[in-house]
Image: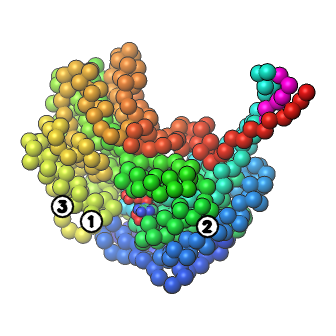
Amino acid sequence: MRVDRNREDAVIAAVAKHLFIDGKWVDAADGATFDVADPATGAPLCSVADATPADGRAALDAAVAAQPDFAATPPRARADMLMGAFELLHERIDELALLMTLEMGKPLPDARGEISYAAEFLRHFAEEATRIDGGYQTAPGGGARFLITRQPVGPCLLITPWNFPMAMGTRKLGPAIAAGCTSVIKPAHQTPLSMLALIGILDEVGLPAGAVNCVTAMDSGAVMEPLIRSGAARKLSFTGSTRVGRLLLEQCAAEVLRTSLELGGNAPFLVFADADLDEAVEGALAAKMRNMGQACTAANRFYVHTSVIDEFARRLADRMAALPIGPGTRAGVAVGPLIDQAALTKVQALVDDAVGRGARVLTGGAPAGGAGYFYPPTVLTDVAPEARMTAEEIFGPVAALTAFESEDDAIAAANATEYGLVGYVFTNDLRRALRVAEALETGMVGLNQGVVSNPAAPFGGVKQSGLGREGGAVGIDEFLETKYIGVALP
Ligand code: NAP
């Protein structure tokens, strides 16, 4: 049952469902559209423009044409636009959160949390825009000087996933705008509405025509590959799966396109015997259940010391079982639907595989059925190392527990993956905490905490979890080139 159907219709009606090219909202060249569905019901919400490759090219042409003037705007002017957008996101947080919940499924409080997190990237990079630095240096041999300056990379292609439909956009657009780069951004087909709302806000705060262009499309490859191979773009920044990231990296090689990749994760969550179990359970809930487990940072494998695994498993299962499930628009709901039927089918297949290899189900384990893509919070213990879910992202509300005996065993198990985004460590022993944090082959570590994302911190992975960092002091570097000018000074 919808809370307020009229309000829902109003927030959907308020979004422009077109492509945004050269400062104008336009239909696809062939007039095609595709449907956006509500994952809580499976029913269509509305339809948006389905870009053709020619539309993609028009968007990139606009970004290329706008690049020189945009690079020349005063940093303060770019900062002011970002701050204006930051303020509008907060002003409209209720409408934007409802829009996000409708297209993506996360409960309303989580959607509000994401809008606020997304806005924070705009503020962070507004501040960074005015601090782009350079250098002046005497050559070691004397007789010359080095002038070092930093310039925008140039027109960027930005591709974002469905799981954080607004924040993954601002995490790229914030630094691109701050650095003076123009862009073409493409959201995931499941969740274009939050991005279109964001683009509308950027237009409202006065971004010049062509500085940001947005294409929505069902066939992403057909629209984006020609742009990647065009030679007209200077950078690709992609957030999504490792599978698609690898494919795009290959495409980028032909033009030696500068590339930032934020890819999949398979986070280990280590609980040592000396951990505070209350803290560990809280951390586990945060690391597992954010976005119904559909986060690159989601704890995928729990390794718990043999002496505490039964107690930890019991407490976690009790907490997970008590989480209210339902449409994210309903008050009090903590667990919304998964994004689509394919996600639901995959989660169930991974659970069945683990159970077939001896895992025990402490809670959950099967979908409730009915409309929408709901999967109950699930805790499995005695998960075998060969289970598929130890190697693959579960991307659902399923905690997979395995016991370990020694610190070395825990580290070896944690690192036995091609991924390396984040790891979580729960222990009250300072030396162990630092030893294990240093030994984990990940870009980020949560030490006695289940959430690491923060716009002011460098987010990113090692191994096949990606290349480069977003956010933090280094986030803007991904959109800047360093230029050195040698000056003769006899
Ligand atoms: P995905 O299938 O890789 O898609 C990501 C984006 O790439 C979407 O916009 C998608 O558009 C587009 N895409 C797909 N195929 C493409 C192609 N051939 N050419 C150009 N674009 C293409 O990932 P997802 O299912 O949306 O997102 C979940 C994944 O993202 C997970 O693996 C998660 O771990 C990862 N993720 C990583 C981070 C991080 O910061 N490391 C953050 C969030 C999510 P369409 O689907 O509309 O075609």
Tally of numbered discs: 3
Viewer-proximal residue among 68 and 138? 138
User: In percent of the image, x 48 and y 48: which residue is there?
Assistant: 261
From the viewer's perspective, is residue 324 above or below residue 191? above
Residue type beneath disc 2: Leu
Q: Which residue is mark 3?
A: 368
From the viewer's perspective, is residue 488 above or below residue 97? above
Mark 2 neighbour density, 10 Å: few (under 14) some (14–19) many (20 or more): many
Looking at the picture, how far across and down is residue 283, in whole percent? 34, 35
Residue type beneath disc 3: Ala
In the image, is 58 to the left or to the right of 80?
A: left
Give the overall secondary structure of the magenta segment: strand
Alpha carbon of mark 1 to alpha carbon of mark 2: how far?
33 Å
Q: Which residue is mark 2?
A: 60
In the image, is 39 to the left or to the right of 312?
A: right
Q: Which residue is mark 1?
A: 341
| Mark positioned earlier in the residue sequence (1 or 2) | 2
User: In percent of the image, x 39 and y 16: which residue is there?
Assistant: 430
Residue 359 visible: yes
From the viewer's perspective, is residue 379 above or below residue 141? below
Looking at the picture, how far across and down is residue 155, in whole percent? 64, 58
Mark 1 neighbour density, 10 Å: few (under 14) some (14–19) many (20 or more): some
| Mark positioned earlier in the residue sequence (3 or 2) | 2
Which image quarter is the N terminus in? bottom left
Stretch of the chain drawn in magenta: 142-147
